[in-house]
Amino acid sequence: MTERSVLLIIGGGVAAYKSLDLIRRLSERRISTRAILTNGGAQFITPLSVGALTGEKCFTDLFDLTAEAEIGHIELSRSTDLLVVAPATADLMAKAANGHADDLASTALLATDKPVLFAPAMNVRMWEHPATQRNAARLKADGALMVGPNDGAMACGEFGAGRMAEPLEIVVAVEEYFKGDGAKPLAGKRALVTAGPTHEPLDAVRYLANHSSGKQGYAIAEALVRLGAETTLVSGPTALDAPAGVHRVEVETARQMADAVDAALPADVAVCAAAVADYRPSRCADRKIKKEAGGLEGIALTENPDVLAALSEAGPRRPTLVIGFAAETDDLERNARAKLARKGCDWIVANDVSAASGVPGGVMGADQNVVAIVSAGGVDRWPALAKTDVAKRLARRIA
């Protein structure tokens, strides 16, 4: 018996062919699909193929009198649990963001009282255009969900952000919305996340630290728990509240973080987003060091434990998937590849923390991030995204 339903709106783009696979993947998960095929979408796939896969009439025309008599565009947009727009073209997103309703797809989007998930697909220049970015931001502010777009080669011959998310990525996003027991792909899995800075004491009042806010790690922990993972967050000092459903272990130093991480094992996945201090003062004074006495000159340092390398070591306690972070100011991908080889982890999330990242004021402490996923299979470059969106996208990839 089908438990959930989706109204799929198929926009006019080459990626429309992926929507056929999306229908099949949803059906495998007992999610039924009705579909609206736009005039543009019908240039790439046919109503017959869509109807054959959904097992329902494929809706195309706003003024189809038979369809209006039988169901009506208002009822069509509301007799479902979730609307999915895939591919979501620049035009469809613009219509939805600005309340236009001149065809069946845009009318359904305006008339619905259900959440909408957009899977953008367009040329990289169209995606990066300020108008499209404004429309995407407006849709999110209005409560819409987003999955993608991904980076990669496009049918037009260009490369960059704009490829529609793969069908299974969209399925995971749909399942994330449907929070039933069988709709959490990480249910039964254990996740371990580190976040924030470490503070390495120098004396009774001073410490060595960095500018990490912990926002990215906390967002990742929240995204993993939303996908069903039992999640432990080992956090250095931050001003953030623990995400709902996450077990937080608060630490201060790198050595405390290493001990807490070891205590949290076993885990299926470990995401090391914390900015762990590489070194600590060799000696911590029990009272304030007076600068007049020259005590702050020539501070001796000792190397801290390497949390990521320890997690990546082969053995029965090694998580199936170990993900590290590399905050770099230059040679981002080269340095990330070197770290991947040196640490022995599975992926490196390389984030550009330089002034050239495109994030006003820099990534550290900001709400946006610019990352690339570096693995043995290559480099997947992501556009500038909100840290919460980076977290959701990474969690879907983990799932």
Image (tube, grey):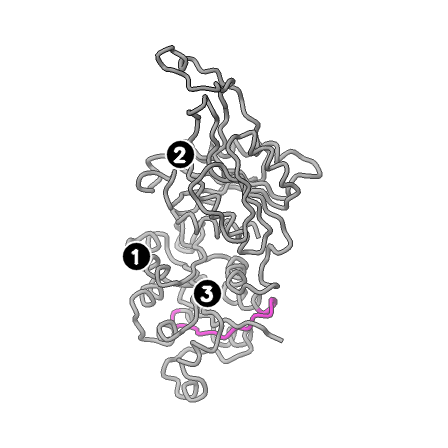
The one of 88 and 198 positioned closer to us in this rendering: 198
Which numbered disc flags the more N-terminal residue, 3 or 2?
A: 3
**Disc 3 residue type?**
Ala
**Disc 1 residue type?**
Arg
**In the image, is residue 163 above or below residue 193?**
below
Label drawn at residue 16: 3
**Which numbered disc, 1 or 3, marks the residue closer to the eye?**
1
Q: Residues within 10 Å of mark 1 (few under 14, many from 20)?
A: some
Residue 35 forms part of the magenta stretch: yes
- Apparent side of residue 104 relative to residue 217 in the rendered image (left or right): left
Which numbered disc flags the more N-terminal residue, 2 or 1?
A: 1
The spot of residue 69 in percent (x, y) is 42, 89
**Which residue is denoted by mark 1 in the rendering?**
134
**In the image, is residue 368 above or below residue 86?**
above
Question: Furthest residue to the front?
Answer: 287
Residue range corresponding to the magenta coloring: 27-40
**Which numbered disc, 3 or 2, marks the residue closer to the eye?**
2
Q: CA distance from mark 3 to mark 2?
A: 44 Å
**Disc 2 residue type?**
His
